[in-house]
Image: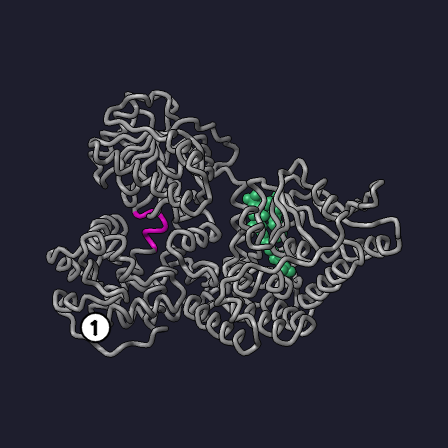
Amino acid sequence: MEKTFNLARREDGIAILTMDVPGETMNTLKAEFGPEITEILAEIKADSSIKGLVVTSGKADSFVAGADITMLAACKSEADAKALSQQGHVVFSELEGLSIPVVAAINGACLGGGLELALACHLRVCSDDKKTMLGVPEVQLGLLPGGGGTQRLPRLVGIATALDMMLTGKQIRPKQALKMGLVNDVVPNSILVETAVELAKKGKQAAKPVKQSKINQFLESSSFTRDIMFDQARKQVMKKTQGNYPAPAKIIDCVRQGMNKGMVKGLEVEATHFANLVMSKESAALRSLFFATTEMKKETGAEGAEPRKVNKVMVLGGGLMGGGIASVTTTKAKIPARVKDISEQGLSNALSYAYKLLDKGVKRRHMTPAVRDNIMSLMTTTTEYTGIKDADIVVEAVFEDLALKHQMVKDVERECGEHTIFASNTSSLPIGQIAAAASRPENVIGLHYFSPVEKMPLVEVIAHKTTSPETIATTVAFARKQGKTPIVVQDGAGFYVNRILALYMNEAAQLLLEGQRVEHLDRALVKFGFPVGPMTLLDEVGIDVGAKISPILEKELGERFKAPAAFDKLLGDDRKGRKNGKGFYQYGPKAKKAKLVDESVYKVLDILIASDKEAKDVAERCTIQMLNEAVRCLEEGIIASPRDGDIGAIFGIGFPPFLGGPFRYIDTLGAGNLVATLRSYQTLYGDRFAPCETLVNMATEGRQFYSH
Ligand SMILES: C[C@H](O)CC(=O)SCCNC(=O)CCNC(=O)[C@H](O)C(C)(C)COP(=O)(O)OP(=O)(O)OC[C@H]1O[C@@H](n2cnc3c(N)ncnc32)[C@H](O)[C@@H]1OP(=O)(O)O
């Protein structure tokens, strides 16, 4: 069997231990490495000629990307998972206990168990490479650092910093890692191992005291003050997670017990909590997202088709969406983008949108002014169709007006090359209708971004009947270069995401009209796990935008999409939401910092406030139609798979990740139970709740969407 670890002795007495998992792209930690590493550690201990040890990786892109998540997912019981954590504890303690200095030389991803391995070394050096990032992202998988991280990290960088890293899962760049004392040096990759060797030769050194604010020094100084800090952290995470995610509270408990009762106790608590989390349904759902997104990175979107290279992009429309699209094209994909708008004002808006985003990076010291200016130089503007003949993709982000979009298709076909792709960022118009004006419809596709473009991870790539596979593959690859997760969906009003969202929003509106308070509706859905409630969302997106989409969906998809008629009164009262400072909530200079409902909205809608319904009933009534419609989209072939439907809902509208997406959630609920609930709502509130055929069949046959 090929070995994972290689120990090379140098003449100067420093040995280099290189980890290189055979046949895999990245190093990950697996239980089966246990005997091999134990043997090597014994060999090192027995060899008095070894005066120091450097631990490094043979992979170009990773030090170690953590414990193997597939191995964790395969655990059958808490006992299995606890054994894994304890095995890690033993090996890392042995490494830490070596009498010779041990230095980790880190290049590339050093995450989760990988960072825990590095923490067990006495010193750490990392490369300044762009790929080098350090962190403990376990919380994003519904887990906690189970290889001693909850104990060693706070002891190295301080409790406050360690909690911040563990509770957010954020990745730390080399410079920042040096500043916070996570690594001892940052050097170019070419001299990484040599620097680590030199450090090892200097011998073990006492860790430099962590630079802490006065308040944190005080808070970390006694168990009494530490407890205040832990209680505060607990309150904050409960507020943020609404108690839906068990990992954060367990992370805090591990640190509390370890810092107050010592490392041995801390490790014991860590292994127990880790095991419990590995077996939790929340972690299973979050792990499924990791597997889904990793799998999707390899797909071209159209079987057998290869993407063409995109060297130049044009964006039509310099509004919020156009500015955002141009910005991710230049900043993330590093592809030149030419923005066209009819007005100079539109163009300067787009430029300043992109500039402000980049400048934020400069202010936070994530980039230099020179890099910002370089990226800005990739963005040019025009009011005419000039300098775009060789554009590979034109992304249209103008008003939702079919005639205008037809004009754009014709203009682009006239002004650009035969191969130029016309991608429409429409949120509601069927792409087939837009392509009807094209003489090269195979080049026409939908590319639906979500607002704000630079933040929202999803794009829907919409193929109409005759979009060519090459156009699909090129658009998918382009979106990925922009840092997006694309899902390919079929053409149809509202595509996938807006279609399932519309029913959810309509039901929230219906509940409002029945007298449920605005803030109660929002709280109920936030408690369920959405990042914001439906009323806040409508204010953010624009009540006018919602009102424009609704009739299109109703016309194309039927009566169940009919928005409550009373909502027209909102527009009659010029209530568009945040953008004009008039919506469900108060805005503007007079508004208090704490968000307050604009109570006058009840009068406009003739609402008599009723007593609050149970939050879980409110959430169920709004989300159940979303679930039903998601299945209908699968039934109609709008989405290709439950996996795409889950990723689309989570990344597009923030469907609670701990539920794994609508389809995984249906599996948890059971199709039979869901159908029964839908039918009871149907009796009470009408046919918009009628369960779709697939769900009914699944209920009869006892089927699930996923086999695991
Ligand atoms: C006990 C411990 O405390 C518990 C843990 O350590 S839990 C694990 C914590 N670590 C993580 O969460 C990191 C997970 N990995 C990532 O975020 C990303 O892979 C990355 C940022 C490291 C690299 O991203 P990117 O360059 O886009 O590469 P990506 O396509 O995701 O991954 C490359 C390959 O490595 C695999 N991989 C990366 N990290 C992995 C992990 N921790 N477990 C299993 N496989 C992993 C991917 O599945 C993929 O495999 P493939 O080539 O066979 O498809």
Count of numbered circles on the image: 1
Tell me if mark 1 has few (under 14), some (14-19) or many (20+) residues whose alpha carbon lies within 10 angstroms of its own: some
Q: Position of residue 291 (x, y in %)?
A: 56, 52
Q: Which residue is mark 1?
A: 515
Q: Position of residue 509 (x, y in %)?
A: 24, 64
Q: Is residue 496 magenta?
A: yes
The span picked out in magenta is: 494-500
Asked if the beta carbon under badge 1 is closer than 8 A to the nearest atom of ligand 1, the reply is no
SS label for mark 1: loop
At 23% from the left edge and 53% from the top edge, which residue is drawn?
542
Image side of residue 258 versus residue 524, left or right:
right
At 64% from the left edge and 63% from the top edge, which residue is drawn?
152
Whether residue 637 is visible to the viewer of this picture, yes or no, is no
Instruction: From the viewer's side, name the closer residue of 260 and 306.
Output: 260
Q: Quadrant of the C terminus?
A: bottom right
Q: Is residue 222 magenta?
A: no
At 20% from the left edge and 58% from the top edge, which residue is drawn?
588
* Amino acid found under the numbered disc labelled 1: Gly
Instruction: From the viewer's side, name the closer residue of 311 and 115.
Output: 115
Whether residue 111 is visible to the viewer of this picture, yes or no, is yes
Image side of residue 612 versus residue 274, left or right:
left
Instruction: From the viewer's side, name the closer residue of 643 and 539.
Output: 539
Question: Quadrant of the rendered structure where residue 436 is?
Answer: top left
Is 472 located above or below residue 639 in the figure? Answer: above
Coloring scheme of the render? one colour
Q: Position of residue 185 (x, y in %)?
A: 63, 47
Work out which residue is located at the far left of the displayed protein and give it.
572
